[in-house]
Amino acid sequence: MSHAKTTARLFDPAIFKQAVLASFSKLDPRIQVRNPVMFAVYLGSILTTVLWVNSLMATGNESSGFVLGVSAWLWFTVLFANFAEAIAEGHGKAQAASLKKARTTVTARKLTGSETGRHGLAEEIPATDLKVDDIVIVKAGETIPADGEVIEGVASVDESAITGESAPVVRESGGDRSAVTGGTRVISDWLIIRVTTLPGSSFLDRMISMVEGAKRQKTPNEIALAILLAALTLIFLLVVGTLLPYSIFSVEASGQGRPISLTVLVALFVCLAPTTIGALLSAIGIAGMNRLSQANVIAMSGRAVEAAGDVDVLLLDKTGTITLGNRQATRFIPTQGVDEKELAEVAHLASMADETAEGRSIAVLAKKQYGLRGRELEHIKPHFVPFSARTRMSGVSLDGQEIRKGATEAVEEHVRSLGGSLPGDVRTIVQEIANAGGTPLVVCRDAHVLGVIELKDIVKGGIKERFAELRQMGIKTVMITGDNPLTAGAIAAEAGVDDFLAEATPEAKLSLIRDYQKGGRLVAMTGDGTNDAPALAQADVAVAMNSGTQAAKEAGNMVDLDSNPTKLIEIVNIGKQLLMTRGSLTTFSIANDVAKYFAILPAAFAATYPALKTLDLMRLSSPSSAILSAVIFNALVIIALVPLALKGVTYRPVGATQLLRNNLLIYGLGGLIVPFIGIKAIDVMLSILNLV
Amino acid sequence: MTPNAFLQIGLYVGVLLVCIKPLGLYMAQVYSGQATFLGRFVGPVERLIYRLCGVDPDAEMSWLQYATAVLMLSLVSFVSVYGIQRLQGLLPLNPESLSAVSSDSSFNTAVSFTTNTNWQGYGGETTMSYLTQMLALNVQNFLSAAGGMAVLVALVRGFTRSNTESIGNFWVDLVRGTLYILLPLSLVLAIALVSQGVVQTFSSYEEVALVEATVNADGESVMTQKIAVGPAASQIAIKQLGTNGGGFFNVNSSHPFENPTPISNFLELLAILLIPASLCYTFGEMVGDRRQGWAILAAMSFIFLGILVLTWTSEQQGNPVLADLGVDQAASELQPGGNMEGKETRFGIVNSALWAVATTSASNGSVNSMHDSYTPLGGLGPMWLMQLGEVIFGGVGSGLYGMLVFAIVAVFISGLMVGRTPEYLGKKIGAFEMKMAALVILLPCAMVLLGTASAVVTDTGRASVFNPGPHGFSEVLYAFSSAGNNNGSAFAGLGANTPFYNGMLGLAMLVGRFWVMLPVLAIAGSLAVKKTVPAGAGTLPTHTPLFVVLLVAIVVVVGALSFFPALALGPIVEHLLSTAN
């Protein structure tokens, strides 16, 4: 499956237009009431509108132009908040649409008509349109469109996407090898399959609708933050509400001026309330989900994205994530008295019919080192001996010679039965290879052991640096492998993971996760097989591969459409980004209030206590200009921060202390200083334009 | 900036710092139920009390049971303090035959002492009998202080425990805090104070001849004066140690029998911050990371010293209006200089400013000078310290648990900036904790703002405001800041012993105490159930200088944002007006 990554421009014209329209339709009070901070601003806007109408009719103390100005900008504040949410939703919908499109690239050849044999009529339809009990035919090179049961044919199927084992398996009708999994590929021959479960698509559809935001629910941290913001809003409501009696008292005490007007009180309240973060909070959450789907990952819930930021332990499968698919031959090591080239030749012969990745890699190495090619063998009538679990050897018999390669014990037994023995230096070589995490394959011709082929896992390039980064982020990496502890340890050391679980069974995985969780840690893992399902269900962040089984997908809380196990690291980044954006904008929003006080308070009490003019640090041109400038700044800052809310604050893996220091400087100190400059600039503009 | 000032403040801070570790460690032992060196003497008494009261010291309580026990104790305390005041005319140990206290004043005082506020709407020597002072008020000095410490310890247990409902046994915490900490320290301090001349007697007031005869308002000549005495030392020791602050005499520690010498002043001053500061160490010890305690202490000290510099320099600079009149306010060999109105000559500027800042940072509220006479900015310091929520040292126990709630809020806002959901001391901070933290910050703040509003718009409220203009406003604001945050310090200048103020301030005190305690206990209960998340490289460290700065910033910004408008109309404008000319 391939997915066109859609990184829609931040303000795509179509999305922009939709969002502008939605900004107005979201003025519905039933929608507004969901966000307490913005609902308070909404009520303030209505109140100032009433005040404006009133100022037109009655001879109030305030110029109706001023009241209209404040009222208009309060409405803008509400609209800007709506716009922020709408544009994030727009991006989400666009994302979802492209995901749906990308997903339909798998086509199924559905057999129609009564004749269901190989030559029956086939109709090509998108895999998503398949239903249970549909019959499909899959030919060599095609992807099996859905989980199902083979009803006709025999074929070798590459299930490496699910099992990690690149050796093809045989699937045939009847017996216990008849089940096939969606997403796996037929390598040779053909199969006719009856679809047994609804293809992953309907499940994905459910998840994609989550991305569209239709079923978006607030996440736990978002709820907690909303409570804090509501509490701050209440405090400011109290501060502003009690300012009226204080002002009445002060007017009497000083004998001059007028009590603070309702318009100014509402303006002050809106400026103080955490509107910046209040307006952007839901946009930040939606944008987090969007970034995830941009990475071709679909999350079941925002909760999982949030949890991704908290992950302490990553469980990573060795195969495919840390190492390249399979073990490869890296060296021929002959025993004493044998030429290395001779060993290579014999090994090459032994592997000629070996279609496993390991076997092929031996041929490749022989070709690379000694230019050996597949010889025409017809005349010597070779007899290939395939690998079997009983003999644990494979090879070829030709010219009366028995060439075998296999596990040390198996070969030792084999040569002993022919009257030979395992040379001492071979034993040493085998031990050395095993100690270094490799797999030794001993090669023999008749009763003579010729040497050893070293098979090794090839650790992916750059993975070590990735793990070092994770360590700096405070995340522990654990490698999961079916290898024995010795092999696992060597690879773990080479890849730079913190820990490993060798000889891993599904039960061992599950209990490992439970142990970490008991210690208070959050565990993330990827998985694809049905036997991963319990562990996936237990993990806090569980990413199922889209190529995986239905059970795995149902158990996980995210699905990676690319089926790339390294994606987990990207997901953690996205989670952290989401949380950081929330924290940074909250800090910015609160820090902003300081400047607003210095703008509005001296203005509000200019007539009662002219001495308070000293607090007007910005030297604003007039009281009404000061108040209007603060309100306008407050509204514009929301729009100015929409791109940041959508893109997210950049996360760098530098450790918590430095991260905090950097962000405090930018958003804390910045939040303190920026409004002083912004309000002053708006004030200057207003007086140049002669608007106040 | 006199060398004398540096010496005085340096000595005070130095001695305080030296005491913090041993006392903090000792208190951690007491609350962890470990054996202490006093166990041999106090242990049998402790066990006897449990047996008499039917308390099983090993039974643990959930936060709801703990909270119920706190409320029960407070209710019983309230009723008994109220009752003793109303009946004092009939009760013994009343040599001056003082009659029953009025119902509204009794209500106010009963609330005040059970909530560890010790706001005094009454004058001690003219209102309360010896029995009332000792049995009603002084018993509460111990119990309300031990109660605050118990709630703190319960919160700390919430952090240290995991997967459990129980946060300790209130009765055990209460008894141990009283027997092992408050009583021994009070005993030592009381004896030291008596050595300095603080009175301790049951005999009646002395009638002495005046050195110079005078006339009263009616023109009759007056030859003698009544000098109030009483069992004062025993009450003063605990009122300082337990951040109570309710003086035996009306003028509190300005009174020569309550605070006669510079040494008694130093000891009483030390006693104000001794336990609140040491509890930071106790906290660090109990959570198993002393750096956490030092970080909190550093944040508190930072704000304390900042306000101290503001108040002290403002007072040392003196009154600009007097300066215009040519009055010499410079410090010299012969005078302390500065604004000496309302201050005792034996304490001077430095020790008065130090006391004012210490008593309002801790929710003590005792005074050795009259804050009403401070310069506007000098008075702003103490007032704002109370408005910060009494978390800069604060009341014994209550100050630290308030500060820990602020730490939770700081962690919540900024913890997100490191890309993890917030956690403090290994506990995830979720929606429930935020809800409770919001109550802790919101409600005292609401009581101050709404109380002040109700007083300045109603005629009954305004009738008690004797000073015109912004200063009158400051007086009302100060009174509600003091009550709403359980400090008890009075700006004075406000006729507060009226049914309106007794009622409103009483309400503010109740809300300020219990609507902070209950959410804090709820947080403790919720945290105790949670798992402990081990710290890693990605966890926000809460012991670093950076976190201290962050905590200070959150406390200051929340305090400033909530009260800046009110302060602007009170002390700030008063200052601007007085310097404008």
Image: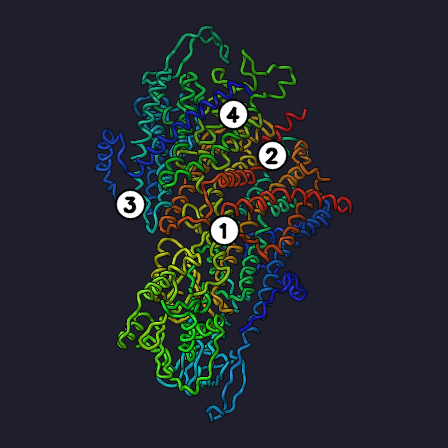
Q: Is residue B324 above or below residue A254?
A: above
The amino acid marked with disc number 3 is: Glu
| Circle 3 Cα neighbour tier, 10 Å, few/some/many (<14 / 14–19 / ≥20) | some
The amino acid marked with disc number 2 is: Ala
Q: Which residue is mark 1?
A: A227
Q: Is residue A14 left or right of residue B112?
A: right
Q: Which residue is mark 4?
A: B371
Chain for mark 1? A
Identified at 44% across, 54% down, the residue is A475
| Circle 1 Cα neighbour tier, 10 Å, few/some/many (<14 / 14–19 / ≥20) | many
Q: Is residue A358 left or right of residue A426?
A: right
Q: Which residue is mark 3?
A: B60
Sequence-wise, which precedes: disc 4 or disc 2?
4
Callout 1–callout 2 Cβ contact below 8 Å: no
Q: Which residue is mark 2?
A: B568
Instruction: Give me the C-alpha separation between circle 4 and circle 3.
Output: 45 Å
Is disc 1 placed on a helix, strand or loop? helix
Sequence-wise, which precedes: disc 4 or disc 3?
3
Q: Quadrant of residue B85?
A: top left
| Circle 4 Cα neighbour tier, 10 Å, few/some/many (<14 / 14–19 / ≥20) | many
- Percent position of residue B70, x then y: 34, 40
